[in-house]
Image (tube, helix red, strand yellow):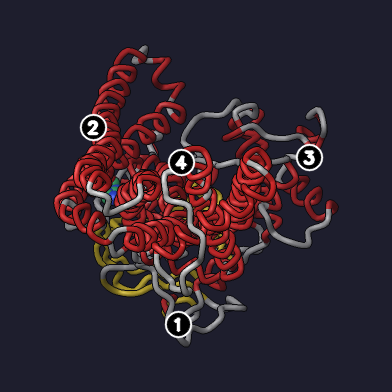
Amino acid sequence: MRTIWRVFRYLKYYPWHIATNVLFNMLAVFFNMFTFVMIVPFVELLFATSQPVDQLPAFALNQEYLSLWVTFTLNQYKSLYGLWPCLIGVSMGYLAFSFLSNLCRYLAQYFISPMRNGITMRLRNDIYHHITILPVSYFTAQRKGDLISRMSNDIADIEWGVLTSVISLGKDPLNILVFSLALIFISPRLFLYFLVIMPVAIWLISIIGNSLRRNSVKGQNRLGHLFAVIDETVSGIRTIQSFGRQRHRVQLFSEANNQYADTMIRVAQRRELSSPLSEVLLTIGLVFILILGGMAVLEGQILSSVFILFVILFARLVPPVQSMVRVYNNLQKANAAAERVFEVIDADEQIHQLPNAKSLTHFQHQIEYRDVSFSYQTEPILQHINLTIPKGKTIALVGPSGAGKTTLVDLLPRFYDCSQGSILIDNTPITQFNINSLRSQIGLVSQHCILFNDTVANNIALGLPNFDRNAIVHAAQVAQAHEFIMQLPQGYDTPIGDRGLNLSGGQRQRLSIARAVLKDPPILILDEATSALDTESEIAVQQAMERLMQGRTSIVIAHRLSTISTADEIIVLENGRIVEQGSHLQLIAQQGLYKRLVELADFK
Ligand code: ADP
């Protein structure tokens, strides 16, 4: 149960909410107690079980004095005003206490609501903030679904656990304490009988709690898997439908869904057991008391009205005890959820920034890969890469699929760090730069252009502040995107659906080029699209790319001969090594891999 304490630390932002909640809960308990105490005069009035008291004994804070005082006072009022007014008076008292108690209960809930939603809001913010700085390698397909499940369901479990425990801890222990004290006050002996069965109850309840926690973890993991399947299906719906693999996906989903349901059924069955179980245990206690207390009444050791009060107060112990048991179970579940949430918040960012990192403001001379090797796991992906790119030049990376081209460019903005060797900008290793300043110098146009669910203009500006419409329009013009944007129903304010499904491939690419134009970075990484565009789009995209590259230093993962032949230098990669390097004509003359790739037109 350690992790959940980290969530409870968020409570420090809400001292007043908690204080008011506890205060009103205490008042509610207090008034509630009185509603039950009103039972005694009621029974006394109707049944007159005790002897009339003529004179009040000396004051003492004990049950005998209070009973005598109640009987004495009632008798006085009864002889003064008669039975009916007394009955109505007692009933009104009952009503007033009950009203006050419920009013306080509502106020307690009212003041705790900002805390309830505030804590989960802060948790969601923290997890989201951390997601944005986690390394690219963290986000595997499985993780995506799992993250959504952590941000929604786990946080909901935490919310429920924290809320119920704050509410319950603000009132249930107090309730139990007050009612227990009242019971001890009335009859310590009867209360002792009840205490005997407590350890058994606690033991049984904790067994259920532990099993709940284990199953909750399993359930949440399975839900993560379920979300992953949904995410994959939605992203890959074209592939699934075109290959007619719906049945296979449905089968995959229903398996994952069945497993999740099975676990959740077990969780529900365990959870539902704890409440009846605690009630049965308390009832066993009550039966003890009924038998033993009944004997005490028959022997005249205790007033029957007081005994009835004892039994009623005892019955009132049941709900707060049950509620505490529920809270314990909810906390077990919330703890499991908190472990999953903090796993993300604590996940290593991997790409660390040095404490005294410099800011990269002006890229001046060159980018250099110096004996760079890299592996994702154990298998080497890049080996001993040496490469210098002078400022203002364009280099084209070519090579068969899987040669390591994407990996090579991903190292520059530090999506990953080199396993060996280093990358230097103007002779300073990139690890010494402030990460944001490094990335601000690099523009990325990838072949999988991601558009966000926002307007066209905002997709180009991508959250960059202080951009006026003119700059956005200019960027779109440079990227050859202005004309088609103007033909959209609301121009630059047209919303783009999720993943830009209602734009063509060429249009999407031009939008992502406009994004890079607007960012205006000195260094560009371009991943040319492998998919064929229609000739018109192809020409437009090509022109847009050329304009974008003007005056910048560019690394292009090239798939088109037109791009490659205009590059200052071509780097041919194979199995993670540079195998050829030079201009188009030089490489053709070498009669090696490059020539074969050109002949096959295979630059993928
Ligand atoms: P290219 O861009 O030339 O097609 P990549 O750089 O994408 O090549 O991939 C090079 C190799 O690295 C491939 O064998 C690929 O399977 C592997 N690879 C790529 N990304 C990852 C990753 N995130 N984790 C593990 N292996 C990867």
Is ligand 1 closer than 8 angstroms to the Cβ of mark 4? no
Q: CA distance from mark 2 to mark 1?
A: 58 Å
Q: CA distance from mark 2 to mark 3?
A: 58 Å
Give the left or right position of residue 449, taking residue 513 as reference. Answer: left
Give the left or right position of residue 69, taking residue 285 as reference. Answer: right
Q: CA distance from mark 2 to mark 4?
A: 54 Å
Image coords of residue 237 (percent x, y): 45, 23
- Residue at (28% x, 43% y) in the render: 216
Whether residue 24 is situated above or below residue 46 in the rendered picture: below
Q: CA distance from mark 3 to mark 4?
A: 25 Å
Instruction: Identify residue type, mark 1.
Output: Thr
The disc label shown at residue 383, or none = none
577 or 103, which is in the foreground? 103
Disc 4: which residue: 559
363 or 274, which is in the foreground? 274
Instruction: Identify residue type, mark 3.
Output: His
- Residue at (68% x, 61% y) in the render: 520
Give the left or right position of residue 359, taking residue 103 as reference. Answer: left
- The answer to whether the residues at label 2 and label 1 have Cβ atoms under 8 Å apart is no
* Circle 4 crowding by C-alpha within 10 Å: few under 14, some 14–19, many from 20: many
Q: CA distance from mark 1 to mark 3?
A: 39 Å
The disc label shown at residue 482, or none = 3
Choose the circle earlier in sequence order: 2 or 4. 2
